[in-house]
Image (cartoon, rainbow, N blue to C red):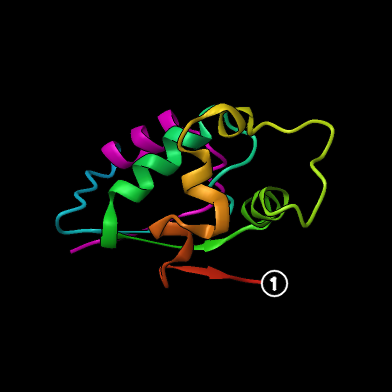
Amino acid sequence: MAVYVVGDIQGCYKPLRRLLAKADFNPKKDQLWACGDLIGRGTQPLKTLDYLISLGHSFQTVLGNHDLHFLAVTAGVRPAKKVITLTSFWIAPISANMCSGCDSSLWRSNRLKALY
């Protein structure tokens, strides 16, 4: 079993998948740990989160400032910034299930740790 650690995925789905393929990552036997900012500047935040969620218990993470900002905006605790690159979340049907009240198994699981 190997443990891979990545940081600042930023919603960059394709580069993440290329990196994991190059490392020969196998979710059946390996672990992937992410050091925050799962979403952010990349163009595929929803696809990225869908993939990470699909990894189940082979995936562990801490939340970064982009992730916490998104949750705060979704919860109505904080206003959205003028330029936000999470457009696919706002129009995606899964958005409400993924964010509202932290219903998603990933967002509410003990696999996510918020660091301040």
The residue positioned 15% from the left and 59% from the top of the image is 29
Q: Quadrant of residue 5?
A: bottom left
Number of labels in the image equals 1
Camera-nearest residue between 22 and 7: 7
Q: Quadrant of residue 13?
A: top left
Give the image location of residue 54, x and y in percent. 29, 47
In the picture provided, is 8 more to the left or to the right than 97? right
Q: Quadrant of the N terminus?
A: bottom left
Q: Quadrant of residue 105?
A: bottom left
Q: Quadrant of the C terminus?
A: bottom right
In the picture provided, is 23 more to the left or to the right than 34? left
Camera-nearest residue between 108 and 15: 108
Which residue is under mark 1?
A: 116
- Which element is circle 1 on? loop
Give the image location of residue 104, x and y in percent. 43, 55
Q: State whether residue 1 is above or below residue 51.
A: below
Camera-nearest residue between 52 and 79: 79
The residue positioned 29% from the left and 37% from the top of the image is 22
Give the image location of residue 75, x and y in percent. 68, 54
Give the image location of residue 52, x and y in percent. 37, 47
Classify 10 Å Cα crowding around label 1: few (below 14), some (14-19), many (20 and above).
Answer: few
The residue positioned 22% from the left and 43% from the top of the image is 24
Residue extending farthest left: 28
In the picture provided, is 5 more to the left or to the right than 7? left
- Mark 1 residue type: Tyr
Camera-nearest residue between 102 and 31: 102
What's the magenta region? 1-21
Q: Is residue 111 magenta?
A: no
Q: State whether residue 102 is above or below residue 70.
A: below
